[in-house]
Amino acid sequence: MKFITVAGPPSSGKTLVLIHLIRLLKDDDLRVVVGKIDCHETADGALFKERLGIPVVVGRSDYVCPDHYGVVNAEEIFKFGEAHEADITIVETAGLCHRCAPAIKGCMAIAVVDNVSGIDTPRKIGPMLTTADVVVITKGDMVSQAEREVFRSNVLEVNPDAKAVELNGLTGMGALNLKRLVLDAPEIDTLTGRELRHDMPSAVCSYCEGETKIGSDYQMGNIIKMDVKEV
Amino acid sequence: MDINEIKIVSGADKNGNPEAVEELIIRKGDILVLAGPTGSGKSLLLSDIEQLANGDSPSGRRVLVDGKIIDPFSTRITACLSQNMHFVMDLDVGSFINLHAKSRRIATSNTVEKVLELANDLAGEPLSANMHLASLSGGQSRALMISDAALISNAPVVLIDEIENAGINKTKGIQLLSTEGKMVLIATHDPTLMLTAQKRIIFKNGAMAKLIQSNDIERKHLQYFLEIDRVLESFKQSLRNGNRLDEETLKALIELRGVNHGQ
């Protein structure tokens, strides 16, 4: 089975990208299963079911970091895919803080970023982008050709080994290129023992444990204070 | 990137019947119009070219570049001018042109000047390097997009989706791309644009149904279409400058009608 992680900032178009991709994969008679991870209530799981009629499992991380939650539950989602005899299991992550990335060594990692987020975004979002094998660039219809070219070149500057795919989430233009790459993604037998490409943040301070008050007296654990100097 | 020819080996319509046009060849400098009702398959052809379909798209078409299948990830052969008329970048025009040229590693000392000169040739209102991108009018933005696509973007194929007449000379814009050696494909419903091209493909039910070569008689029509466009444009300018229509303007219109009827 192929196991693929998909990450990207909120509203970058992850779900629509996947819907167009999976529609093409289904046309090729491939069985696809989706694991969708979010922090809060999400209707996206139902959207996959409704539009594509494929098996979907939804995980809500609630008060836990969604990326930690994603890793903790990766094997469970993998097994869900196996139970449905899937050819491809895709995990769509919530991808929020830009500090880490869900990419796993030996599994295809896709990052989704959008043109409208600004030409400096590729430099800002860190490991999510730098650890990706494939970078899908969306919302090209909302900017000019020149802006698309500059954005793309900034993406490839940050991650020169990535394949960049421009995809229009409304029309699906570009999904064919993404499908071609996904068909070449490696197959794996198990996730157990596999490694993340990037470490997760060491978030073990008092606030992780539910502290809400501000002030040094309330701060314990892994605390880093800013060096406050004017830029 | 320099290519001389794109060949599209046809596939099938929505029902799986072979396309009537078996093969389509587009050469450097060609202007090709895609016409047909909404949903007839114009966008699918643009999509096939953009993604270099190799029998793996819904149409089953194959796109050969200079006779060969090429890797869609190593080379981008298309630039698109969509209906979008505005920039989202927070920059002045000069810095923007330089930034784009640098990302393509082709910036020289007079790049900005050259792009602006072409853009000004197309735009109704003049553009300068210190203007802010966000403050440009639709016409100025579109003129800049075309001139930038002609001079900086290296894609040999320019795909144009229904270019609107927003204060620019659209036929001139397209001629310009063509003389810069681009292959220009335009999906449009506009009769003036349709006749600007030497060839047009008519789409039906997802397929290339007919390939029509324009001829002398059609080009004579084009002169009148351009005249009508020019008259409408002058009325637009006049009305938005606060003028009223009067006996004079009506007379001018009636005369024009006479010309069109060959009276």
Image (spheres, coloured by chain):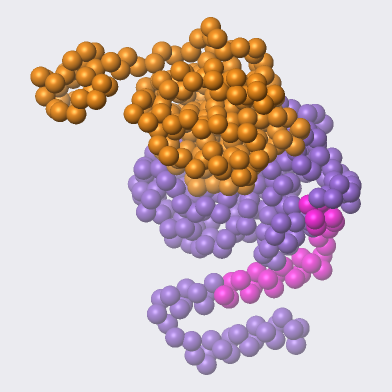
Query: Image point 69% across, 73% down: which residue?
Result: B224
- At which x and y percent is residue B193? 68, 61
Q: Considering depth in this image, is A139 or B165 the residue closer to the camera?
A: A139
Give yes or no for residue B213 being in the magenta stretch: yes
Kindly indicate the quadrant of the structure image that contains residue A62. Answer: top left
Residue at horizontal 60 percent and vertical 54 percent from the top: B173
User: Quick one: quadrant of the C terminus of chain B?
Assistant: bottom right
Q: Position of residue A151 (x, y in %)?
A: 48, 34
Q: Is residue B150 visible?
A: no
A96 lies left or right of B10: left
Q: Residue at x 49, y 90 (%)?
A: B246
**Chain A takes which shade in the image?**
orange
Residue at horizontal 14 percent and vertical 27 percent from the top = A214
Question: Where residue A60 sits in the image (x, y, percent)?
Answer: 43, 31
Residue positioned most to the bottom: B247
Image chain in purple: B
Provide the residue span drawn in magenta. B204-232
Determine if residue B238 is in view: yes
Task: Give the vertical position of A63 relative to B143 (above or below).
Answer: above
Residue B147 covered by magenta stretch? no
* Residue B233 rendering spot, x and y as whole percentages: 54, 72
